[in-house]
Image (spheres, grey):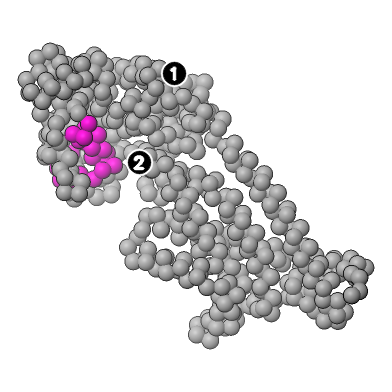
Amino acid sequence: MQGLDLGYMIGLAPVILGYVPLTLGMAAAGMVAALVLAALLAVERVVRVPVLDWLVVLFISFFRGTPLLVQLFLFYYGLPQVVSVLTRIDGVSAAILGLTLHFAAYMAESIRAAILGVDRSQWEAAQSIGMTQSQLMLRIILPQAARVAAPTLVNYFIDMLKGTSLAFTLGVTEMMGAAQKEAAGSFLYFEAFLVVALIYWGMVEALSQGQKWLETHLNKAYAR
Amino acid sequence: MTSNHGISIKGLRKSFGGTPILDGIDLEIAPGERVVIIGPSGTGKSTLLRCLNFLDRPDEGLISIGDLRVDAARARKGEILGLRRRTGFVFQNYALFANKTAAENIMEALVTVQRLPRAEAADRARAILAETGLADKADSYPAALSGGQQQRVGIGRAMALDAELMLFDEPTSALDPEWVGEVLDLMRRVAERKQTMLIVTHEMQFAREIADRILFMHGGKIVEQGTPAQIFDTPQDPRLQRFLARVGG
């Protein structure tokens, strides 16, 4: 058992850190798209449009019921064989697409619960002053639901950030891919992947701090 | 503003799960008239108000407010919105928008429904808050207000619609006794503006004082109606007599 090659790790860190923007970019793009999609899915689940509701239930069930890795492989390796438009989909896009759909399914359920948590009488009050369904959703219900769901949604963002490492399996050179390549030359696999782990850990810790701040900030809202 | 058409309701029916709650309501309300509905609970008083606002969808009946005529059985979305914009609704549990300040609660309909410029809506909201005696609470969220203050904002929100008819659904029933007075005072001020009002309440003293006409509902029907003196001093129907004996009107 040899000691850790700290010098190697310190030298490698800047190389891996160079891929942080890609990781954060994939996670951020996936999060924004997933939030929009999840909000739409959640509203549909609450309003229940005939037929569409059945499709949404199916969508949520499938993307919650199958592993993310399998979904990514389906999009990247599988779908292009069936749908010709997708033949040129690159690994990064496939990863973002997969992360979006997967996490949207989970986030939709949290947002739906948060929507249902808003006192029913506020729906009626909004209707009573003549607001349309979309006005009452956008101006009254969703802003309140967002506050309730926010801490949970940050959790999903953290999961998604870690999930970007699976893009490695689609041939994307992100932090894992870079570490793998470096280690292939140095044979210092433990050190290389430890660097990756520490960087992920640092990012997640920073997000958790942000989440704590968010929670106290949100709890204070509406109390003035 | 009040029009000369008044309000007319014909053959309004509503049942929940096969049980009739409104069993054919016919009612005319003159502009500026203040009508109070009394009766035991479960007799359809609140449902009548909610049906006029389509918070509960009536099964059948004709509702006319001003120049708008709605056939309940065939009401389209636009007609329902039109009806809601002509009727202000005050809820028993206030139902303020929790994510909006007192001023924003009142502005909401002006900005989103009437499409007034924000500055103008803010001016209107300030004027209404002054009338409700809450000028200093403009920037408070509902959570920071007492029940009485919240209900005054709720009334202000309904006043902002400048509705031809204001509906009050037991506006003081959820209040601690100490806040009831200030809410009734505000309703008196609303009445002084010649606002047409339809009020469901259990405050018999208030009903006697504010009403031009009192309706007694029982079993989804208007069983007896008349001036406060007729209803309280010379009730005819034995069900009304029993009800009054019980509530001590």
Residue A41 versus residue B89 in the image, above or below:
below
| Relative horizontal placement of residue A77, taking residue B75 as reference (left or right) | right
Residue B98 versus residue A163 in the image, above or below:
above
x then y, percent, for residue B12: 15, 40
- Give the magenta-colored segment's residue range: B41-63
x then y, percent, for residue B119: 50, 32
Task: Please state the chain letter of the residue tagged with numbered disc 2 in the rendered image.
Answer: A
Q: Which of A208 and B145 is in front in this view?
A: A208
Instruction: Inspect the magenta stretch and tell me whether residue B43 lies in it.
Output: yes
What amino acid type is highlighted by mark number 2?
Glu
Q: Distance between the residues labelled 1 and 2?
A: 25 Å
Who's the residue at 29% across and 39% down the image?
B84
Is residue A139 something that shows in the picture?
yes
Which mark identifies residue A124?
Answer: 2
Task: Please state the chain letter of the residue tagged with numbered disc 1 in the rendered image.
Answer: B
Residue B128 versus residue B49 in the image, above or below:
above
Who's the residue at 32% across and 63% down the image?
A50
What amino acid type is highlighted by mark number 1?
Gly
Tag 1 secondary structure: loop
Tag 2 secondary structure: helix
x then y, percent, for residue B87: 28, 34
